[in-house]
Image (cartoon, rainbow, N blue to C red):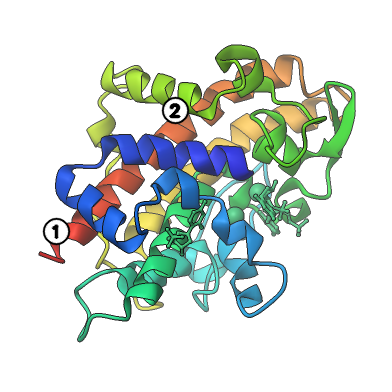
Amino acid sequence: WGAAGHAVVGLVAQTLLPPGAARLVGELLSGSTLGDVAAWADTVKRKGPLAYTFDYHFADAHDDPPRDCNFDDARDCPTGACLVGAIANYTRQAGCTGPRLLPRAQRAQALKFIVHFLGDIAQPLHLFLRGRGGNDQKVVFDGMPMSLHAVWDTGMQRDVRAAGRPEKRIRSDFGGSKDSYAAHLVAQIRAAAWGDASAWISPFGPDDTNARGNSLAAIEWAVEANAIGCWAAWAPYDADPAQDFGAAYYRDAVRVVDHQIARAGVRLADWISRIAAACR
Ligand code: DCM
Ligand code: DCM
Ligand code: DCM
Ligand code: ZN
Ligand code: ZN
């Protein structure tokens, strides 16, 4: 997601945090909210001392979408240098279950990575090798050239960096307000618009990892987002790569964007509340 999508994931989660978890967040972030810090990880991944985190924003399924979609942790993240490994690593750094508590600044930074990566793992195109997650598929969205990846990251929502680009969902339905969009998603969650949201919570928790050190819950989320990307992102792309993606493609895919951002917000609130429970 772009900055707006990440912020909305954070805003949804912040609203759903139980009091103990909200206290931990307030302490570590010095009063900033999950919405404030959600996009930070994208600002440090390209250059500077944290450039090694670039690969942590996605996980390349070596599958063949849309004919055959699957995410296989052993095949697709063997070294842990991808989303499902990064989520385990930063969860450990932020929490209180290790041999000793890490310095506060390191825990705060780890929390900011968690907020971001639980968003990225719900963006279906972050779970595909094909076209580097759709970056190589050059398409048109409401008359503007962009990659298929950018259609999902920003085109369908709103990129605060680029006023001239589409702000489709947030602009056309929420008056340009991320807060209104987040409030709408929270209302949908509470009304069980997608069914019981507690079913989105993995039986695996922050401490559950496999032999590669990858997060078992994150692997479930990766498998799910890859399967969704198969029919929601790739099949309608291949049906007509020359279409304007702001029309029929948008109308179908934006429902999936809502669902995935809502899922990410619910999972993030639960994840942080479980981390906080181990800190008391
Ligand atoms: N992003 C951001 N701030 C930056 C760089 C990127 O908020 N300084 C967000 C908006 C982008 C998204 O990250 O659309 C995806 O990053 P990119 O496509 O540049 O890798
Ligand atoms: N922070 C951020 N984005 C914001 C506000 C704050 O990434 N919009 C980060 C910077 C710090 C942490 O949150 O690491 C706490 O911020 P501060 O100490 O400035 O309140
Ligand atoms: N990306 C991805 N899968 C890849 C490579 C990149 O999902 N295999 C994401 C990371 C950025 C965006 O795509 O958010 C832009 O990547 P790039 O800077 O490589 O064009
Ligand atoms: Zn992206
Ligand atoms: Zn990212």
Helix, strand or loop at disc 1? helix
Quadrant of the rendered image containing residue 48:
bottom right
Q: Residue furthest bottom?
A: 99
Q: Position of residue 214 (x, y in %)?
A: 40, 70
Question: Looking at the picture, which amino acid does disc 2 mark?
Answer: Ala
Circle 2 residue: 182
Q: Residue at x 42, y 19 (%)?
A: 184
Q: Residue at x 73, y 42 (%)?
A: 161
Helix, strand or loop at disc 2? helix
| Quadrant for the N terminus in the image | top right
Circle 1/circle 2 CB separation < 8 Å: no
| Residue 128 in the figure: left or right of residue 119 | right
| Residue 173 in the figure: left or right of residue 245 | left
| Residue 69 in the figure: left or right of residue 271 | right
Question: Looking at the picture, which amino acid does disc 1 mark?
Answer: Ala
- Residue behind label 2 places its C-beta within 8 angstroms of ligand 2: no
C-alpha gap between disc 1 and disc 2 = 25 Å
Q: Position of residue 65 (x, y in %)?
A: 67, 44
Neighbor class of circle 1 (other Cα within 10 Å; few <14, some 14-19, many 20+) is some
Near-viewer residue (113 or 149): 113
241 vs 97: above or below = above
9 vs 164: above or below = below
Neighbor class of circle 2 (other Cα within 10 Å; few <14, some 14-19, many 20+) is many
Quadrant of the rendered image containing residue 149:
top right
51 vs 244: above or below = below
Circle 1 residue: 277
Q: Earlier in the sequence, mark 1 or mark 2?
A: 2
Residue 66 in sight here? no
Near-viewer residue (178 or 5): 178
Q: Position of residue 11 (x, y in %)?
A: 41, 37
